Image: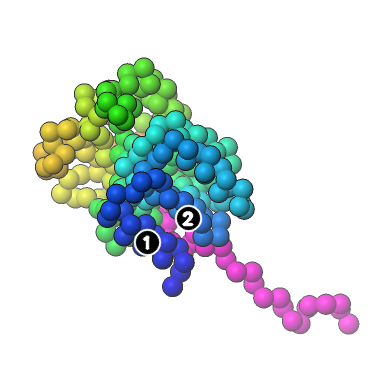
């Protein structure tokens, strides 16, 4: 079995129980990140990069976490022009890290309804008070990451929230036919997603979150083995 399949399966299974800190797993030139983002994760991510060249970061099953750590990881990803991919839930700080990718794609899956990115305004993780002073930085960062494609009215709805639980969810176009491509859920509707607001006229590609509609296959993340040398031309010419 492809080792990446094994690692991703382990991430999905592990997330059924609370994860104390973000787990970082390597498979050749791919890093898989899942779980809660903690304050020292940027340093841990940097150490993982020192273990060899990384071309792809796959984010899966993370509810977010520490904002400063997310910015630190995002800076490392964008600075090294690493591609990002997502499978499963990737919310808040996780979505910020995803947006740093040079190329940003969703992993192909039999059930794409289980993969989505969630964005909302920053807040104090302990008091859950909205951090209004931190909103402009994140807002401008997302506009830059999407090359201005993220409609400002839509972005403002996601950023200027009333509760820390309010969030805007983005799905692959057509994957979640019952709930739409984009949903905005408030604290009162999260328990009943059918009551969330469905946003029409945009999708995850048109707003610049994904850089392409092409889905990424897990097997394409693995480096290809070098082709065997041609025995007829190998060595000196006679």
Labels 1 & 2 near each other (Cβ < 8 A): yes
User: How far apart, in angstroms, are the residues tagged by discs 1 and 2?
Assistant: 10 Å
Sequence order check, earlier mark of 1 and 2:
1
Secondary structure at badge 2 equals strand
Crowding at dot 2, Cα within 10 Å, few <14 / some 14-19 / many 20+, comes out as: some
Q: Is residue 26 visible?
A: yes
Looking at the image, residue 150 lies above or below residue 1: above
In the visual, does 115 lie left or right of 23? Answer: left
Question: What percent of the width, then of the height, locates residue 226?
Answer: 64, 69
Which residue is tagged 2?
25
Question: What percent of the width, then of the height, locates residue 117?
Answer: 32, 43
Question: What percent of the width, then of the height, locates residue 227?
Answer: 64, 72
Crowding at dot 1, Cα within 10 Å, few <14 / some 14-19 / many 20+, comes out as: few
Which residue is tagged 1?
10
Residue extending farthest to the top is 133
Q: Quadrant of residue 133?
A: top left
Q: Main secondary structure of the magenta part?
A: loop
Say whether residue 63 is magenta: no
* Residue drawn at point x = 21 percent, y = 23 percent: 162
Stretch of the chain drawn in magenta: 210-238
Q: Is residue 94 visible?
A: no
In the visual, does 195 lie left or right of 218? Answer: left
Secondary structure at badge 1 equals helix
Looking at the image, residue 23 lies above or below residue 41: below
Residue situated in front as seen by the camera: 62 or 217 = 62
């Amino acid at each position: 079995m492809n080792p990446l399949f094994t690692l991703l399966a382990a991430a999905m299974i592990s997330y059924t129980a609370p994860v104390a800190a973000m787990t970082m797993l390597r498979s050749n030139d791919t890093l898989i990140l899942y779980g809660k983002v903690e304050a020292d994760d940027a340093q841990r991510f940097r150490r993982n990069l020192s273990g060899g060249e990384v071309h792809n970061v796959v984010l899966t099953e993370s509810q977010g976490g520490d904002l400063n750590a997310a910015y630190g990881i995002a800076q490392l990803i964008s600075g090294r022009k690493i591609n990002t991919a997502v499978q499963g839930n990737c919310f808040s700080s996780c979505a910020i890290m995803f947006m740093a990718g040079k190329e940003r794609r969703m992993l192909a899956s039999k059930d794409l309804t289980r993969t989505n990115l969630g964005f909302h305004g920053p807040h104090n993780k302990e008091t859950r008070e909205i951090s209004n002073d931190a909103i402009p930085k994140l807002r401008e960062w997302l506009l830059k990451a999407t090359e201005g494609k993220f409609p400002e009215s839509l972005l403002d709805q996601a950023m200027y929230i009333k509760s820390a639980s309010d969030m805007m969810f983005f799905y692959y176009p057509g994957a979640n036919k019952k709930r739409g491509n984009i949903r905005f859920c408030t604290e009162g509707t999260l328990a009943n997603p059918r009551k969330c607001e469905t946003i029409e006229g945009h999708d995850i590609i048109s707003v610049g979150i994904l850089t392409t509609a092409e889905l990424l296959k897990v097997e394409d993340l693995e480096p290809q083995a070098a082709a065997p040398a041609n025995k007829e031309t190998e060595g000196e010419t006679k």
